[in-house]
Image: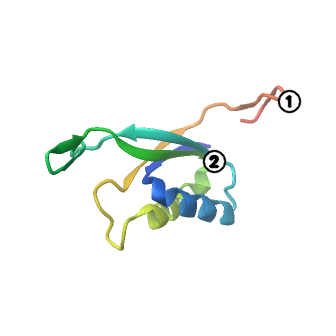
Amino acid sequence: MLMIKAIIRPEKTGIVLSELCDAGFPAVTKYDVVGRGKQRGVKVGNVHYDEIPKEMLMLVVNDDDKDDVIKLIMRNAKTGEKGAFGDGKIFVTPVEEAYTISSNSKVL
């Protein structure tokens, strides 16, 4: 199993969640986050915005589903055809164990 964390633009969250659900991945945790990338924020006129609002989507998938989920997120979170700075990042990490709290049972 793998955990996929996608940090995306807030205006893209609805379509990404909808497409994930339609593709059979309804279980997602969503966080409101702020941060900055390599560009160190955004400067508009004389004002520097150091913390840019984003959304983080977190889901756990089978190893075999990783490529499909990543492609789906990238396709729907990208700005325009080529994408733009600030569209986000996707991180993939292994999940060693998982438990369901209500049943006290180990999932993995």
Left or right: residue 24 compared with residue 9: right
Q: How many marks?
A: 2
**Which residue: 56% across, 60% down?**
14
Distance Cα–Cα, label 2 vs label 1: 20 Å
Pinpoint residue 94: horizontal percent, then vertical percent. 54, 38
**Residue furthest toward the bottom?**
81
Q: Which residue is mark 1?
A: 103
| Proximity of marks 2 and 1: CB atoms separated by less than 8 Å | no
Question: What kind of residue is marked 2?
Answer: Val
Pinpoint residue 18: horizontal percent, then vertical percent. 62, 63
Left or right: residue 42 compared with residue 9: left
Please state, as top left, top right, bottom left or bottom right, where the N terminus lies in the image: top right
Q: Secondary structure at mark 1?
A: loop
In this rendered view, identify the residue nearer to me: 14 or 101.
Answer: 14
Q: Residues within 10 Å of mark 2 (few under 14, many from 20)?
A: some
**Residue furthest toward the front?**
46
**Which residue: 50% across, 41% down?**
32
Q: Which residue is mark 2?
A: 28
